[in-house]
Amino acid sequence: MGFLIRWVINAVALAVTVWVVKGIDVYGSTTVRNVLTLIAVALIFGVVNAVLKPIIHVLGCVFYVLTLGLFALLVNALLFMLVGWLSNLLRLPFHVEGFWPAFWGAIVMAVVSWALSLLVPDRIEQPA
């Protein structure tokens, strides 16, 4: 259940990012196609973050310390560009124009998903 909630949060955050950041586009022919694209790209985004981000954190630990965490902005932008590239490989109508849109997109995506996560409880209590 937590995975599904996280997936929906990522899809909504991605929709806000597409709406706010120039250079990140969903160009499907219909609204339904755009929504399905956002859902698929959110899944790709989640998988990329779950698989690659921990590896990058371990390998780049020194850079995180030396730059006081600013290296994370670069990593997030590059991962966002990777998601755009993978979406293109899968022929999804999602496009990231370059580094700067990916940079700002990663920031917007992080802030919006954080804000949405505050609205969703960590655990849903089951009745005893």
Image: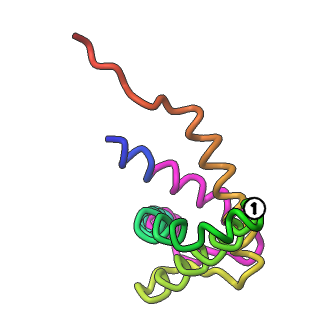
Farthest top residue?
A: 128
Residue 97 lies, with reference to residue 20, above or below; the image says below
Q: Magenta residues?
A: 8-37
x and y, in percent, of residue 125 in the image: 34, 20
Residue at x 47% of width, y 83% of height: 86
Residue 89 lies, with reference to residue 19, above or below; the image says below
Residue at x 76% of width, y 64% of height: 70
Q: Main secondary structure of the magenta part?
A: helix
Farthest bottom residue?
A: 89
Quadrant into which the C terminus falls: top left
Quadrant into which the N terminus falls: top left
- Could you tell me if residue 33 is visible in this image? no
**Disc 1 target residue:** 20
Q: Secondary structure at mark 1?
A: helix
How many marks do you count on the picture? 1
Residue at x 53% of width, y 73% of height: 59
Residue at x 28% of width, y 19% of height: 126
Seen from the viewer's position, the closer of residues 29 and 67 is 67
- Label 1, residues with CA under 10 Å away: few <14, some 14-19, many ≥20: few
x and y, in percent, of residue 124 in the image: 37, 25
Is 14 placed left or right of 128 in the picture? right
Residue 21 location, quadrant: bottom right
Seen from the viewer's position, the closer of residues 2 and 23 is 2
- Could you tell me if residue 91 is visible in this image? yes
x and y, in percent, of residue 26 in the image: 59, 74
